[in-house]
Image (cartoon, rainbow, N blue to C red):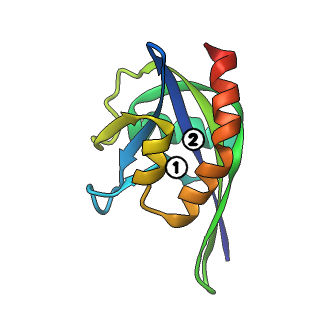
Amino acid sequence: MIRRAAGGIVFRWKGDSLQVLLVSARANRRRWVLPKGRLKRGESRGDAALREVREEAGARGTIVGAAGEVRQGNRLVRTHIEYFLIAYRGATEDAGEARRMKWCSPNNAAKLLSSGATRRMFREAQERLERAARQQR
């Protein structure tokens, strides 16, 4: 069985510093993850990524490109997560799922991500992230 999911690498500029948004994991608040979740019936991957960013981080954004894909799971259930680069456009009125949030540099984000597969995808996407962020500045 394959589950489809989507998530986002949300970024913003704070002065001259590029920052990426991480959220705490639902099951273990000491672990840091990128906002992500399963697609709802009939929902596109892009729409799911934006919804998950809203729900988990209380953030609004615009998709500016593809980031990469992570495949994880076991022999019975595999999850394919497609990540998008999302330019931060502000906070929503809803506080999200009350998860902890952290804005940090891309290099620090790569170190803090709990999943090795997600960390590898993030590192591979860093050049695209920095290029997209410069264009959004």
In the image, residue 105 sits, relative to residue 71, either above or below, namely above
Helix, strand or loop at disc 1?
strand
Residue 89 screen position, x and y as percent: 51, 18
In the image, residue 55 sits, relative to residue 134, either above or below, namely below
Marker disc for residue 8: 2
| Mark 2 Cα-neighbour bin, 10 Å: few <14, some 14–19, many ≥20 | many
Residue 14 screen position, x and y as percent: 43, 17
Q: Nearer the viewer, residue 47 or 116?
A: 116
Residue at figure coordinates x 67%, y 45% from the top left: 125
Residue at figure coordinates x 26%, y 55% from the top left: 29
Instruction: Answer with left or right where residue 11 lies relative to residue 46.
Output: left
Residue 63 screen position, x and y as percent: 66, 29
Contact between marks 2 and 1 (CB within 8 A): the answer is yes
**Quadrant holding the N terminus:** bottom right
Residue at figure coordinates x 42%, y 60% from the top left: 114
Residue 51 screen position, x and y as percent: 53, 37
In the image, residue 48 sits, relative to residue 72, either above or below, namely above
Residue behind mark 1? 36
Callout 1 amino acid? Lys
Question: Of marks 2 and 1, which one's residue comes earlier in the chain?
Answer: 2
Res 7 seen here: yes
* Marks 2/1: CA–CA distance: 7 Å
